[in-house]
Image (tube, helix red, strand yellow):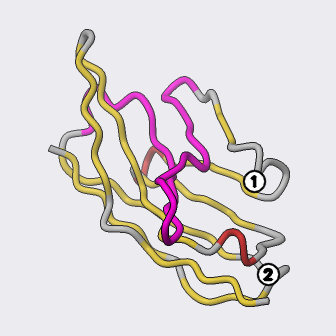
Amino acid sequence: QVHLVESGGGLVQAGGSLRLSCQASGSSFGINTRGWYRQAPGKQRELVASITSGGSINYASSVKGRFTISRDSAKNTVYLQMNSLSPEDTAVYYCNAVRFSGSWRSDYWGQGTQVTVSS
């Protein structure tokens, strides 16, 4: 089992920055991908950014050039640096970890942290 705890959300004005953190605890064996998703009211949860154990990074097109995902393996922590925030970035942000075992995929989720960007 993997336990994920997010921190760093809050209220910020448009153009501002926030950094989210996600610390993992429990069994990290086989965790291949860590990432961030977000869900705005009335919308589906969407991938924001992900990073694999090999260092491959993927961003949603809407955040490229503004958001940066990084990790500190020693701390089992993944970060999401968010710059040039706009009201469209307002959402609950969820930390995610994926474990692959053969063809079986297991997703683990944090409790979510609210990010609100005011105009």
Left or right relative to 94: residue 66: right
Name the residue at 55% across, 23% down. Answer: 54
Q: Residue 75, how many percent across, how many down?
A: 42, 54
Q: Residue 95, how many percent across, how many down?
A: 42, 56
Q: Counting other residues with Cα less than 10 Å from the Cα at mark 2, is it few (<14), some (14-19), or many (20 or more)?
A: some
The number of numbered discs placed on residues in the rendered structure image is 2
Please state which of residues 3 and 76 is positioned toward the viewer in this rendering: 3
Q: Earlier in the sequence, mark 1 or mark 2?
A: 2
Cα gap from disc 1 to disc 2, whole angstroms: 14 Å
Name the residue at 79% across, 68% down. Answer: 83
Q: Say above or below: 46 vs 89.
A: above
Q: Which residues are magenta?
A: 28-54
Is residue 12 part of the magenta span, yes or no?
Answer: no
**Which residue carries the number 2 mark?**
16
Q: Amino acid at mark 1?
A: Val
Q: Secondary structure at mark 1?
A: loop
